[in-house]
Image (cartoon, rainbow, N blue to C red):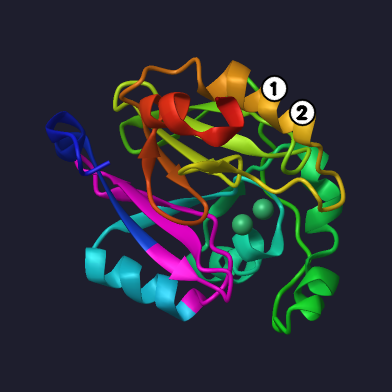
Amino acid sequence: MTQETETKAKAGAVIIPVTLFEQNCTLIWCEATRKAVVIDPGGDVEKIRAAIKETKVTVEKIWLTHGHIDHVGGAAELRDALKVQIEGPHIADKYLLDNVVSSGARFGMTGVRNFGPDRWLDEGEQVSIGELTFDILHCPGHSPGSVVFYNKDMRFAHVGDVLFSGSVGRTDLPGGDHATLLRSIETELLTLPDETVVYPGHGPATTVGAERRSNPFFN
Ligand SMILES: [Zn+2]
Ligand SMILES: [Zn+2]
């Protein structure tokens, strides 16, 4: 997001790698209001809170791209600590949020909780933070309830584990489906402008144009 001058003036972002999965917990804020959102607080809540303090922004929301443990493990704890609301993912991921404790146990993650969001999200809805508004794109396939947060003005999309630089989300976990994932990416993401900056849930940022040209799953 910091790659564009226009964007820089409107918003800022910091990536906080969390959990043993090096998940890109992302703090995004509106420069005009310094109001912020934490996307996918998967764990390491103290580390996330330290980043918030250092950035000197006011977090008002937590957004979740999908229900996997590395993205939601710290969500309930952070919601309580900051007294903010959780928005997302799509209700099709409810079975994952109902089983955060058992998922965490498989990876030795303790202190996590099952929870529900304050608001489920669906295709065509919008969420906002400060003066920034994001469209919700429902992109099932990696998980049935995966959503993407797309800001049209800034040409920016946070895609969770739907699309990666040079790759796509895994579909071998329960509820995953490879054909559905490819269809989601083709219809919802590759139709966005080429210059759209893409922040994935793991690994480096990319752009829609770069993935359309060189992602092996679409060539
Ligand atoms: Zn995932
Ligand atoms: Zn992940």
Q: Is residue 211 left or right of 153 when viewed as pictured?
A: right
Q: Is residue 216 visible?
A: yes
Q: Is residue 37 or residue 201 the one in the foreground?
A: 201
Q: Residue at x 59, y 49 (%)?
A: 64
Q: Residue 103 sits in which quadrant?
A: bottom right
SS state under label 1: helix
Residue 180 image offset from top left, x and y in percent:
77, 28
- Residue 25 is covered by the magenta coloring: yes
Q: Which of 146 and 142 is in front in this view?
A: 142
Disc number placed over residue 136 in the picture, else none: none
| Image quadrant in which you'd find residue 124 | top right
Please provide the residue range marked out in magenta: 16-45
Residue 197 vs 71, above or below: the answer is: above
Q: Is residue 202 left or right of residue 119?
A: left
* Amino acid tagged 1: Arg
At 47% across and 59% down in the image, what residue appears? 24
State the count of labels: 2
Q: Residue 180's mark?
A: 2
Q: Is residue 161 above or below residue 209?
A: below
Q: How far apart are marks 2 and 1 (CA)?
A: 5 Å
Residue plotted at (87% across, 51% down): 174
Q: Where does the image place residue 85, in percent across and percent down from the top left?
A: 57, 51
Ligand 2 visible in quadrant: bottom right
Quarter of the figure that contains the C terminus: top right
Residue 129 in which image quadrant = top left
- State the image coordinates of residue 211 (x, y, percent, origin top left): 45, 31
| On screen, residue 106 above or below 57 | below
The answer to the question of whether label 2 and label 1 lie on touching residues, with beta carbons closer than 8 A, is: yes
User: Can you tell which mark lies on residue 183?
Assistant: 1
Please report the residue visible at 60 percent of the width from the left and 71 percent of the height from the top: 77
